[in-house]
């Protein structure tokens, strides 16, 4: 029997450790770095591959994306009939939950204000806020959004969720589809974005949508920069309707030095770090999925290329 051939390419991740990790996790497989002209492999494991790789590897059994978001891959011409499989969770959901809970609580409990007071040597209490006045709306109730919504609900905030198809989640008031968006926004003060970036979700967080949030809103974007219209967010903050935002993702990364976000005091910025791809968890998941596919079984994380996620 010939061994499985796996071709690897990543625009970001360290090649040598991924290749040796995949090799160790899939005994007997031949794992190699993709090179132009390389023979067609059984499986590709990729992050932001070049179009040439997909063109040359058209006979693959499946393409594994080493991230949860496939928007970069969806911009390419994919080989016909080859399934695309993304990471589902693989250690990212708990990271998202801690990042978002931290951002919600930091804002709600005014920890920035206390820190500023501390630096001035000032002892002063702020009036406690009511959780009922800070309903949190989570856009996207997938693998990451569901975990985040449930984690925020654990702190007794009212939680709303929005997805494409109708859902029922304990402790989360669920809304769905275009027709559910207005009511979802009207019911939310803190807006968390965990949507995939698709033609339907790009620029979703714009002036009109921000105006629909409850007054004194707060935005937490941990999905993709292009979900937010930057100028509209800055205008909503300047008007006072939105109190501020925590942003982990940007239209251009790294965020350009002259971008106005850097100097807006109501913003907290992090460098696309809310949920990192964890190498060993991800490799273990990909290895399990390859074994399942080889046995003719279905796997989670199959991307619907028609809808773009
Ligand atoms: P999933 O595919 O599991 O979930 C996506 C959710 O969004 C689903 O609930 C889906 O609805 C909903 N959705 C998609 N399109 C629409 C639409 N048009 N209208 C309403 N709801 C919609 O993805 P994950 O939870 O795994 O990941 C979400 C995103 O998080 C990724 O695509 C990626 O962009 C981002 N991400 C960011 C990271 C970071 O470090 N900042 C790290 C990892 C991911 P339905 O359930 O009905 O299909």
Image: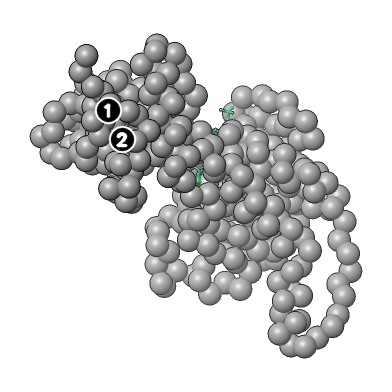
Q: Residue at x 48, y 61 (%)?
A: 271
Q: Quadrant of ligand 1?
A: top right
90 or 253, which lies in front?
90
Seen in the picture, residue 216 relative to 137 is either above or below; the reply is below
Q: CA gap, disc 1 to disc 2? A: 6 Å
Residue 4 left/right relative to 121: left
Q: Position of residue 83 (x, y in %)?
A: 36, 22
Q: Which mark is residue 29?
A: 1
Relative to residue 18, is residue 232 drawn left or right?
right
Asked whether the viewer can see residue 308, the reply is: no
**Residue situated in front as seen by the camera: 252 or 234:** 252
Residue 195 x %, y %: 55, 40
**Residue 169 locus on image (x, y percent):** 73, 29
What residue is drawn where x is 34% and y is 36%?
24
Compare marks 1 and 2 and give the one earlier in the sequence: 2
Disc 1 element: loop
Q: Is label 2 within 8 A of ligand 1 (CB to nearest ligand atom)?
A: no
Q: Are marks 1 and 2 in contact (CB under 8 Å)?
A: yes
Pointer 1 local density, CA inside 10 Å: few below 14, some 14–19, many at least 20: some
**Tag 2's secondary structure?**
helix
Model colouring: one colour
Percent x, y of residue 52: 18, 37
The dot on residue 41 is none
**Viewer-closest of 28 and 88:** 28
Q: Residue furthest top?
A: 296
Residue visible at 13% across and 28% down in the picture: 39
Query: How many labels, in total?
Result: 2
Residue carrying label 2: 23
Rate crowding at label 2 as few (under 14), some (14 to 19) or many (20 or more) other CA atoms within 10 Å: some
């Amino acid at each position: 029997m010939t061994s499985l051939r796996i071709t690897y390419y990543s625009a970001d991740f360290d090649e040598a450790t991924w290749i040796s990790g995949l090799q160790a996790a899939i005994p007997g497989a031949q794992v190699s770095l993709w090179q132009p002209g390389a023979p067609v492999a059984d499986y590709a494991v990729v992050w932001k591959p070049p179009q040439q790789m997909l063109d040359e590897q058209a006979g693959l059994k499946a393409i594994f994306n080493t991230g949860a978001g496939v928007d970069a891959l969806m911009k390419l011409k994919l080989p016909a009939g080859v399934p695309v499989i993304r990471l589902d969770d693989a250690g990212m959901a708990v990271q998202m939950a801690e990042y978002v809970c931290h951002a919600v609580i930091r804002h709600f409990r005014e920890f920035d204000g206390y820190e500023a007071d501390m630096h001035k040597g000032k002892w002063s209490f702020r009036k406690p806020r009511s959780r009922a006045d800070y309903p949190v709306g989570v856009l996207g109730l997938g693998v990451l959004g569901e975990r985040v919504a449930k984690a925020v609900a654990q702190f007794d905030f009212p939680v709303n969720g929005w997805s494409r198809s109708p859902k029922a989640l304990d402790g989360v008031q669920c809304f769905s589809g275009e027709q559910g968006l207005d009511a979802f926004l009207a019911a939310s003060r803190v807006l968390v974005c965990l949507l995939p970036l698709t033609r339907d979700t790009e620029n979703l967080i714009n002036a009109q949508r921000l105006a629909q949030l409850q007054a004194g809103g707060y935005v937490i974007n941990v999905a993709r920069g292009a979900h937010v219209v930057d100028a509209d967010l800055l205008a909503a903050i300047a008007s006072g309707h939105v109190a501020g935002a925590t942003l982990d993702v940007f239209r251009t990364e790294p965020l350009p030095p002259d971008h106005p976000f850097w100097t807006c005091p109501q913003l907290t910025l992090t460098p696309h770090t809310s949920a990192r791809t964890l190498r060993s968890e991800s490799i273990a998941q990909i290895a399990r999925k390859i074994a399942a596919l080889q046995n003719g079984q279905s796997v989670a994380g199959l991307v619907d290329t028609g809808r773009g996620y």
